[in-house]
Image (cartoon, rainbow, N blue to C red):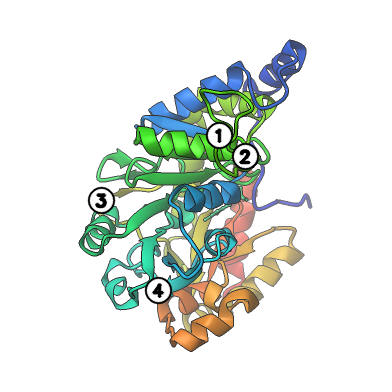
Amino acid sequence: MSKIPVAAPDLSGHEEEYVVDAIRSSWISSTGPYLQRFEKEFAELCGTQAAIAVCNGTVALHLAMLALDVRPGDEVLVPSLTYIATANAVRYVGAEPVFVDVDPCTWCIDPAKLEAAITRRTKGIIPVHLYGHPADMDSINHIAAVHGLWVVEDAAEAHLARYKGRPVGSLAPIATFSFYGNKIFTCGEGGAITLNDKHLELRTRTLRGQGMDPQRRYYFPVTGYNFRLTNLACALLCAQLARHGEIIERRRQIFSAYREMLAGIPGIGFQPVAAWAQPAPWLFCITVDQKEYGRSRDELMALLEEQGIETRPFFIGLHQLPPFRQESQRRGEKLPITDSLSSSGMNLPTYASLTDGDMERIGRAIRNARR
Ligand SMILES: *Cc1c(COP(=O)(O)O)cnc(C)c1O
């Protein structure tokens, strides 16, 4: 029986043609027409003034922290249920991530729990649009405004998701994206920042390119970084964006097929969708209620693995991981929703070339594994 991976890129459009074109043009470093085209088109899709391409999503978050002048001693509120990059970026600038539980209705940072986590040191909030579902940005932005905090959206997993009709990436002063191989749009390794403010854009572009003054070549007013993305990678991204509708539509089909196939299996739950959300179809999520299903999430994953079906457990709450555990305990953080989702949730294979036969195999395996 063939193996079914949990994710695979869809490079079936003009990806190869554009990459060959970039090579033949000799624009293989971090300037060139595909870079300009990508930044322009991605900003348009996100409804922002600008998009800035960077070499991965972690760097996008790090650059956002630098652009906002986050410093040692500062605290930044982040959800505990997220990929570690969200919190690592805060540490890179010497600041401390403070963990907030997620909302059971969105699986994103819970606005009702933000205020209790704010201290004199708190400078900002990084909501994550987890597993494609947008965070409740109006509530988060309101609390941020009341307390004078900045907000950065981590939209790595939620390309083109919408909140109350508005695209993610346009809902805070800065948003960050990842184009890693398992993300909805990909170039292997890549990322972007979207923003709406000319001054912040200039600062971010300067920091991305070693701190060089855009008006005066080889004059460096500040210490910057090499966080650039290549024209080659942007050729891939341009080919992906050229059929963004098709890529999203195919993943939506897979989502509805899973929902239909798995509906009514006792103990199998789905990702909730808030009334105001149009989530991005990233990796399909299920939760396993051990009492109802008769097996734990880990047992189900192991059984699927035996049948050649790769799945992925939900993120471990960052407050449980060695780099953050001690500080979290010292603050006395209790994050029950994160803990419960983290131990019961898993992602199913989601990618364009998944066949109806593959999906039936997965559906049957999940149905039959119940005790
Ligand atoms: C993938 C991801 C990132 C980081 O992206 P890389 O491109 O792998 O560095 C950041 N945040 C979240 C929530 C992610 O899923």
Q: Give the camera-side residue of 217 and 27.
A: 217
Of label 3 and label 2, which has the lower sequence position? Answer: 2
Please identify, in this view, whether the residue under mark 2 or under mark 1 is nearer the observer: 1
The answer to whether the residue labelled 3 contacts the one labelled 2, judged by CB atoms less than 8 Å apart, is no
Q: Residue at x 49, y 68 (%)?
A: 81
Q: Quadrant of the C terminus?
A: bottom right
**Residue annotated with mark 2:** 190
Please identify, in this view, whether the residue under mark 3 or under mark 2 is nearer the observer: 2
Q: CA distance from mark 1 to mark 4?
A: 31 Å
The answer to whether the residue labelled 2 contacts the one labelled 1, judged by CB atoms less than 8 Å apart, is yes
Please identify, in this view, whether the residue under mark 4 or under mark 3 is nearer the observer: 4
> Tag 1's secondary structure?
strand
Q: Give the camera-side residue of 270 and 72.
A: 72
> Tag 2's secondary structure?
loop
**Residue annotated with mark 4:** 101
Please identify, in this view, whether the residue under mark 3 or under mark 1 is nearer the observer: 1
Of label 2 and label 1, which has the lower sequence position? Answer: 1
Q: Position of residue 297 (x, y in %)?
A: 58, 74
Please identify, in this view, whether the residue under mark 1 or under mark 4 is nearer the observer: 1
**Residue annotated with mark 1:** 53
Q: CA distance from mark 3 to mark 1?
A: 29 Å
**Residue annotated with mark 3:** 276
Q: The disc labelled 3 sits on which kind of residue?
A: Trp
Q: CA distance from mark 3 to mark 2?
A: 29 Å
- Looking at this rendering, what residue extends furthest in the right direction? 1
Q: Position of residue 134 (x, y in %)?
A: 37, 52
> In the visual, does 73 lie left or right of 276?
right
Tell me if residue 272 comes above or below residue 182 in the rendering. Answer: below
